Every structure is written in structure tokens, then in C-alpha cells.
Image (tube, rainbow, N blue to C red):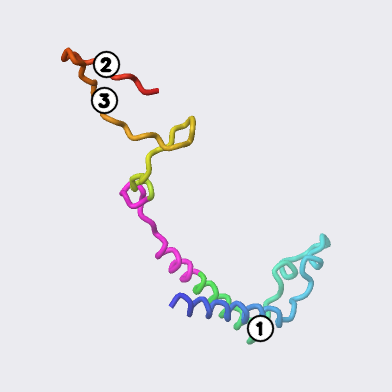
Amino acid sequence: MYYLLLTILVIDAMLLIAVVLLQAGKGGGLAAMGAAGAGSDSLFGSRQAATLLTKATWWAGGIFLVLAFSLSLMSGRGSRSESILRGGGPAAKAPATAPATPATGTPAPAAAPQTAPATPGGQTTPAPKQP
């Protein structure tokens, strides 16, 4: 449905371009609005009869507006993403590897349980500290 409406929009845009370029100019433009007492007739132009090209321009412009608005609504619906606060984002995944140490950039060794070796007299000695 989306691609059908998009195709119709492109065809309508081509038709709108052709209809606007085929129309005769109303004359004057900005050059006719000189400082020599330009009245409301020359400012807004005189009312002319609606021709086939004028009606086609209004219809093609209206269709273009409706299609562009509906396509923008259709394209915005499917791209809603989940919030990362709800656990659906990449922050919710646990890292698979050990974190790197800042000084060397290599993975940190796994922490071994700190147990003190027993001496022959039954006393325990403190475990050496690892750097």
C-alpha cells in the first residue's frame, strides 16, 4: 500500500510540474509593482476565469498534499523503538568478555579466591597481595 501511494505521489508530482509550466504567466510579476502607485488590482492581479489548467493545478496540488501527509503518517508508524529503560535496548545485554584494564588494554585475569596456605604448625599466613 505504501509503495502504491508513493508511486501515485511521484506521478502526481510530474503532472503538477507539467500543468504549472503549461500555464500562461499572469504578467508583470515583481517588475509591475513599481513605486508609481501600484493599486490593489496590480498587487493581487485581476480575477480571471478558471481554465482547465488552473483547475488541474488545484486538483494536482491537493492530491499531492493529501498523499504526502498520509505517506508521512504511514512511514512514522513502523519505526517506533522500545525504550532502553524497559530492557529492550543494547544496555540490557550483559558483556560476554572480561572488562579490559585501563593501563594495558588486556582483559583482567579472573579473580581467584583468597585462601591462606597452612603452615606445619597449624598457623595461617596472610596471602600475598597481587599488584
Q: Residue flagged by tag 1: what amino acid is it? A: Ala
Answer few, some or many: residues within 10 Å of disc 1's Cα (few below 14, many 20 plus, some between 14 and 19).
few
Where does the C terminus fall, quadrant-wise? top left
The single residue placed furthest to the bottom in the displayed view is 52
Q: In this view, does 2 lie above or below 52?
A: above
N-term-proximal mark, 2 vs 1: 1
The segment highlighted magenta reads: 69-89
Say which residue label 2 marks: 126
Q: In this view, does 7 lie above or below 38?
A: below
- Whether the residues at callouts 3 and 2 have beta carbons within 8 Å, the answer is no
The CA span between labels 3 and 1 is 97 Å
Residue 122: mark: none
The CA span between labels 3 and 2 is 9 Å
Residue 91: % across, % down: 37, 46
Answer few, some or many: residues within 10 Å of disc 2's Cα (few below 14, many 20 plus, some between 14 and 19).
few
Q: Is mark 1 on a helix, strand or loop?
A: loop
Say which residue label 1 marks: 49
Answer few, some or many: residues within 10 Å of disc 3's Cα (few below 14, many 20 plus, some between 14 and 19).
few
Q: In which quarter of the image is residue 40?
A: bottom right
Where does the N terminus fall, quadrant-wise? bottom left
Q: Which of 39 and 13 is in front in this view?
A: 13
The single residue placed furthest to the right in the displayed view is 36
